[in-house]
Each structure stands twice: as C-alpha cells, then as structure tokens.
Amino acid sequence: MDPGSQGKTAGRRAARRGGQRHPEVAPLGLRRVLVVEDDPILAMATEDTLREGGVEDVDICPTTETALEALRADLPDALVLDVHLADRDDGWAIAELVETLGENSPRIVFATAAPQDIPPHIAELGTVLAKPYEAEALLAALRGPGRPGLLSRIRGALS
C-alpha cells in the first residue's frame, strides 16, 4: 500500500465517525430518512451509508410500531424498508400507508432478502434492493427520480 492511500483511508474513517460525507460521494439532497430495519448491524451500516450521502437526520426503527410513531411525528424524505420485521411479516404495509399521502409521499426503497415475497403491486411503490446489496446501490436508488403519488398516477391514467 502506498503512503498516500493510507492517509485517505484514515480520513474516510474519521469522516464516517464524524457523520460527514466523503468528498467523492455526491449528496443525496435528502434531509431525513427513516430506516425500518430490525437487524441492528444492517441498520447501523445503512445509517453510515446515508450519512456519507449527506443525509442530516437518520431515524432507525426496529419495529412497525416505532416506524408508525416516527411517521406520525415527522414525514421523512425517504424510507428504507425491510419488509420482514420481527414484529410483522408484512412490512410493506408501511409503504401502502405512506403511498396514500399523495404527491409528497416519501421515496421508498425496499431492502429485503426475499424480494419475491413482496406483492408486485407493492413492489411498484418503490425500488427493491435484494440483500445483501452494495452501499452505492442504496444511494443510487435514493438519487433516482421519485415516483409520482397515488393521486397523480390515477390522474395520469384518467387523462
């Protein structure tokens, strides 16, 4: 390893600990992201990735109940949603609820080891990432264009 690369690695670790993003990671432009994940290691890794992407506020919710409480408190810009949680096996119900908010509903990313378990009409509500996935895949999913809300899709279908 050359001496220059050692310094870069140490700087990245320091930036991660400080909650700052890496200079080479383009900011996502999201203020708040809700991570619904019951595996604490995956939740922390997801939080690190989001913070590196410039997200200011990351809320981690290990259960459906805590996710619903967080949604009632403040609507996030995006959700990263594990669909098989310890308290419920249909975590996509959160996505259905959020989708009813219309055009301003948060962007949804499903993160699951069993993408085939998500009903097709639910999978259409967001991007599906099969675990394990690379951090850049999550950032790319959150950078992509958001989906129009339910009312916009209905209006589009009627016109």
Image (cartoon, helix red, strand yellow):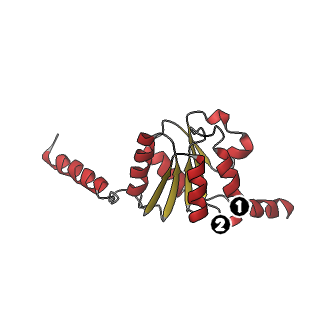
Question: What percent of the width, then of the height, locates residue 69?
Answer: 58, 57
Q: Secondary structure at mark 2?
A: helix
Instruction: Say which quadrant the N terminus sits in.
Output: top left
Q: Are marks 2 and 1 in contact (CB under 8 Å)?
A: yes
Q: Secondary structure at mark 1?
A: loop
Question: What percent of the width, then of the height, locates residue 106?
Answer: 61, 60
User: Which of the two residues, 103 or 100, is positioned nearer the viewer here?
Assistant: 100
Q: Residue at x 76, y 59 (%)?
A: 153
Q: Residue at x 63, y 40 (%)?
A: 88
Give the label on residue 22, or none: none
Question: What percent of the width, then of the height, locates residue 89?
Answer: 64, 37
Q: Which residue is mark 2?
A: 104
Q: Residues within 10 Å of mark 2 (few under 14, many from 20)?
A: some
Q: Which residue is mark 1?
A: 149
On screen, residue 69 versus residue 122, left or right, reads left
Distance from label 2 to label 1 (Cα)? Answer: 7 Å
Q: Is residue 34 visible?
A: yes
Q: Amino acid at mark 1?
A: Gly
11 relative to 62, above or below: below
Q: Is residue 30 visible?
A: no
On screen, residue 93 versus residue 137, left or right, reads right
Question: What percent of the width, then of the height, locates residue 42?
Answer: 44, 41
7 relative to 149, above or below: above
Q: Amino acid at mark 2?
A: Asn
User: Which of the two residues, 53 or 24, is positioned nearer the viewer here?
Assistant: 53
Q: Residue at x 23, y 54 (%)?
A: 11
Q: Earlier in the sequence, mark 2 or mark 1?
A: 2
On screen, residue 86 versus residue 46, left or right, reads right
